[in-house]
Image (spheres, helix red, strand yellow):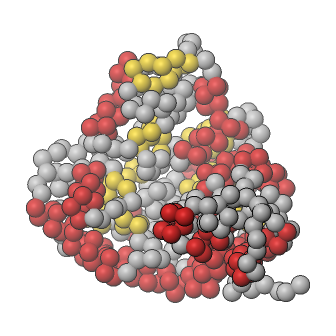
Amino acid sequence: MTKLSQNNAPLFEALKKYVDENVYAFHVPGHKHGKGLEEFTEYVGKAIMNIDVNSMEDLDNLANPIGVIKDAHELAAQAFDADYAYFLINGTTSGIQAMIMAATEPGDKIIMPRNAHKSAFSALILAGVVPVYIYPEINEELDIALGIKAEQVKDAIITNPDAKAVLMLNPTYYGITSELKEIIELAHSYNMAVLCDEAHGSHFYFHPNMPPGGIKLGADISAMSIHKTGGSLTQSSLLISKGNRVEPLIIKSILNLTQSTSASYVLMASLDAARKQLATKGKEMLDKVIYLSKHAREEINKIKGIRAITQDDIKEPFLFDPTKLVINISRTGMTGYEIMRLLRTEYHVQLEMADLSNIMAIISLGDDIEAIDYLVKSLNELLQEKEGTNEIITGSIVRPEVIVAPRDAYYGRNRSVPLDMAAGEISAEMIMAYPPGIPMVCPGEKITKDLIDRVKMLKEQHCQLQGTEDPNIDHIKVLGHMYKV
């Protein structure tokens, strides 16, 4: 058998070989190399349609890889210093759900930050797991959540010694890490598994000036969005694990419950190629990304009224991902939503995210100095031309009271009520701004007037809200019977 190196991309190479053989396709998908979808094929190109194929002997099968996908998995594990790796074609959501389900059983407790992504909360519902929430520190001046300190986790463990796992964000959506090394050592000393949501941290593993990756610090499992910062196609992600604290065969079994049996070879090939690029050129490419990020911050901080956040603003023990260009705009008199909208409509610049006090641009492998300079120029011109009058209301992290376990609330008898009349009720749904996808309220939590007012304010800002069956977020499902606190 040929020994593979990080210069190989076994699945991608097998797909190219398949195309070169001019195979007559009598298998799904039905477009048959694009011939059955001409307009779309003409636009996206014949090559991508040629590799949109189905499982077969020479192309392996994601559900039980024994060939080129197995080889690709092993190379990915090596690249990230893990023992096992699994391609995810349902996004990092499926990885977060799988690792929580693999590390716990129904009724178990998991210690986790309340500012986790909605996929973690959906995993609580699927797994029947009870959360023990930890709240991150808040930088009131910048209106952003920071990381979690080891002392907070220790307090949660002492209070809940029967918890089975600890979930950590590495980093948060805003690019901020926690005292992860200390937290991992602490959790392991109590025989708890450590799970890392590294949706925004796949690049951490390939440059010494980045915060360290969770697996390299000793975490048991990590789910990461290679498509966010590693270069693969949207919806393609990776789950990696190390050691046997969480049984690898259980991880594989759960992924086969939750992932599609018609795995996209286009997505998997992009993962294979992105891993090869990160492993062989990642340091060099990230050198450039770090330079561009530094240049952007220096130029933006010359603009009156706004401030690009740096490590000095975050302060240790929390580390800051330099590729997250978070810009505080609270002194402009405009909200982040207004500035993001104006940048798109007047300058054709699309940012990653906005909140009331900040905007965020992600600097990644595909950026160049021309794009960075255009962003800076656009921001400068916009702020010279526009004068805001808003008084920015801060408070990015809500602390709703948990009354009922998320699964019980989600599946319990419920009724729909107008949001304006929901104060005091127990929610049976989530409400979140997306991005970043952090729920303001989850199933099982008490709805407060402050929450209702915040949702209404975000609606006035035309923020993208989701989570309820009502697409307008005018109504919310609440539990149909009373619970004692």
In the rendered image, the vertical position of residue 273 relative to residue 250, given as above or below: below
Which residue does the image show at 50% across and 23% down from the upper left?
A: 477
Residue 457 visible in the current orientation: yes
Q: Is residue 165 left or right of residue 121?
A: right
Q: Is residue 56 left or right of residue 268?
A: right
Q: 112 and 95: which one is in front?
A: 95
Residue 453: x %, y % from top left: 32, 30
Image mark count: 0
In the rendered image, the vertical position of residue 72 relative to residue 119, given as above or below: below
Which residue does the image show at 80% across and 57% down from the upper left?
A: 63
- Quadrant for the N terminus in the image: bottom right
Residue 303: x %, y % from top left: 18, 69
Which residue does the image show at 28% across and 64% down from the upper left?
A: 348
Q: 236 and 307: which one is in front?
A: 236
Residue 347: x %, y % from top left: 23, 65
- Quadrant for the C terminus in the image: top right
Q: 23 and 456: which one is in front?
A: 23
Residue 225: x %, y % from top left: 58, 62
Give residue 431's quadrant in the image. Answer: top left
Residue at far right of view: 1
Which residue does the image show at 30% across and 65% down from the upper left?
A: 349
Residue 161 visible in the current orientation: no
In the rendered image, the vertical position of residue 31 relative to residue 460, given as above or below: below
Q: Is residue 67 left or right of residue 387?
A: right
Q: 438 and 261: which one is in front?
A: 261
Give residue 269's quadrant in the image. Answer: bottom right
